[in-house]
Image: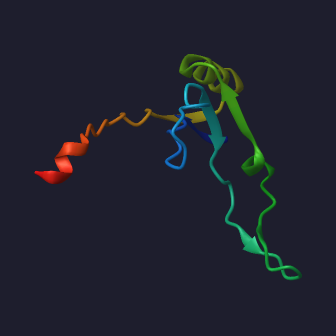
């Protein structure tokens, strides 16, 4: 049986916008460890589910899909947004 993780993407720290942070993602956990390829040295494995990432509009849709397909899953809640309000005058206190 496959294990999966359902989570909501956090905001990218390198960008100011919040694009693509409202959807939910289902990622499969790796079934086997990655090994270096003897010819190229790149890390890889025979597990093709590692390349699969499914997107859903809501958490309920992702959970429904996982239960319908018989996938064991864990739900990771979205990180809480923390606003750090600062004023320019605070630099001179």
Q: Quadrant of residue 79?
A: top left
Could you tell me which quadrant the N terminus lies in? top right
Tell which of 79 and 92 is nearer to you. Answer: 92
What is the basis of the colouring in this image?
A: rainbow
Q: Quadrant of residue 27?
A: top right
Residue at screen point 68% across, 29% down: 55
Residue at screen point 58% across, 19% down: 58
Residue at screen point 62% across, 18% down: 61
Q: Is 50 left, or right, of 77 in this rendering?
A: right
Q: Is residue 30 above or below residue 17?
A: below
Tell which of 20 and 1 is nearer to you. Answer: 20
Q: Quadrant of residue 47?
A: bottom right
Measured as percent of width and height from the top left, residue 21 is found at: 55, 31
Q: Is 48 left, or right, of 8 in this rendering?
A: right
Tell which of 76 and 10 is nearer to you. Answer: 10
Q: Is 76 left, or right, of 24 in this rendering?
A: left
Measured as percent of width and height from the top left, residue 64 is found at: 62, 18
Measured as percent of width and height from the top left, residue 86 is found at: 25, 41
Q: Residue furthest right?
A: 39
Measured as percent of width and height from the top left, residue 67 is found at: 62, 23
Residue at screen point 36% across, 34% down: 80
Q: Residue furthest left?
A: 93
**Total labels drawn:** 0
Q: Is residue 43 above or below residue 56?
A: below
């Amino acid at each position: 049986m496959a294990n999966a993780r359902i989570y909501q993407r956090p905001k990218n720290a390198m960008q100011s916008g919040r694009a693509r942070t409202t959807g939910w993602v289902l990622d499969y956990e790796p079934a086997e460890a990655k090994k270096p390829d003897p010819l190229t040295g790149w890390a890889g494995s025979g597990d093709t589910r590692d390349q699969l990432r499914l997107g859903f509009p809501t958490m309920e849709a992702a959970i429904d899909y996982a239960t319908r397909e018989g996938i064991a899953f864990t739900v990771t809640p979205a990180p809480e947004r923390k606003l750090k309000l600062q004023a320019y005058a605070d630099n001179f206190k």
